[in-house]
Image: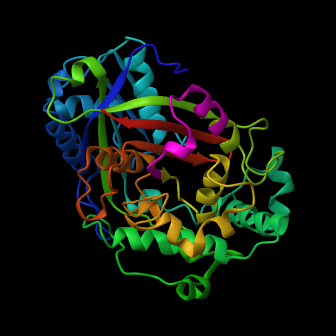
Amino acid sequence: MSALSRELAIVGVGYSELSRAGSPEPKAISLVAAKEALADAGLSGTDVDGIFEYRFGPESPGAQDMARLIGAPDLAAFGDLMPTNPSGLGAALAGAMAVASGVCETVLVFRCMTREGGYQGGVSGFSDPVLGGQQFETPYGDSGGILMTMALHKQRWMYEYGRTEEDFGHIAVNARRWSALNPRAVLRDPVTMEDYLSSRSIVAPLRLLDCDYPINGAVATVITTAERAKDLRQRPVLIDSMTYATGSRVDWNFTDDFLYGGTRDCADRLWSRSSVTASDVDVAQLYDGFTQVTVSWIEAMGFCGLGEFGDWVEGGDKIGPGGALPVNTGGGQLAEGRLHAISLLNEAVVQLRGQAEARQVPDAQVGLVACGLYPQCGAMVLKGG
């Protein structure tokens, strides 16, 4: 049974131009995405009474900045959600809860990323003395960046299930199969399994093509009640269920589940609240900041058994164009570009509206969005209105 107290709909999606070069002004590109999402819904800034955004820091303007930019007269709910959240989707989850509770009626959520702000590979520096869990990581060369943690998770996966890197390569190859059909994607050239296996090592066994691609861009979404959506421009997409999850031990490295973290708890709670099941999903947008995260979500959501992804995926055909479970149909973070989870949410909405053009999944009625990783997970089930 749904935990939402009011029926909710996503009514607008918007993007700025996505680019690989230059240093655009974050406020400028965020405003472009916000205006496009509002226009898509047939609304204006004066209709907005809630704003939520996900950020690392100055690479994204704040919710109050956005209110001034779009001319929202007053905000009944707002928030700037920092990185301990489900990778962008947290803004949409918070916005949906604000509308569901009746605190506000129409929420704008957004994420702005710049290449400089999105790059975390060189994070380093320690307190003196090194304290907490870091005292057990620093002697082994963990400089505080997420890449080393992701490499450890990938290595553990292969060890536990006796699998090889080809399993993860299917995710990387699939991203380009879909992005080739998406004119907005920044990486559209195809890659092969050979390309994946020969891509340079970042932190062994993590490869370049395991990792998402930082870009400049902004993305925005408008959420309101299903009742109000009836009078707006687009066919509404309904939020059937949603949830967060952390897993039982909230830590990246010192945890009791190195393969799934909170993804299995997230899936169990999501399906318990949904009117549909995993077998009903027509299109899945699953976080792919790193390829093993997508594999974790596929198994946790019950599309196949734990450790069975490599055999289930049928050489990659099952998740690609024309496959039984299309995954990341816009190219995802690996190929459309790193915009975090709001871009995955928007892609699900466009698919359920039947507006995805060359990449459209036929008769898509149920969409799944699952984002974040390990101790910071979130997910939604969407249905065409």
* Residue 303 belongs to magenta span: no
> Is 368 on the left-hand or right-hand side of 225?
right
Visible residue check, residue 28: yes
Q: Give the range drawn in magenta.
A: 267-284
Q: Which image quadrant is residue 337 in?
A: bottom left
Where does the image place residue 363, in percent across and percent down from the top left? 32, 50
Magenta span contains residue 275: yes
236 relative position to 255: left or right: left
* Residue at 45%, 29% in the rendered image: 240
Q: Is residue 372 above or below residue 204?
A: above
Residue in front for this viewpoint, 221 or 77: 221
Q: Where is residue 106 in the image (x, y as percent from the top left)?
A: 27, 22
The residue under the point 58% across, 75% down is 315
Residue 115's image quarter? bottom left
Q: Is residue 131 visible?
A: no
Viewer-side residue, 322 vs 20: 322
Residue 166 picture location, percent across and down: 65, 77
Residue 209 in percent (x, y) is at 54, 75
**Which sits in the foreground, 33 or 159?**
159
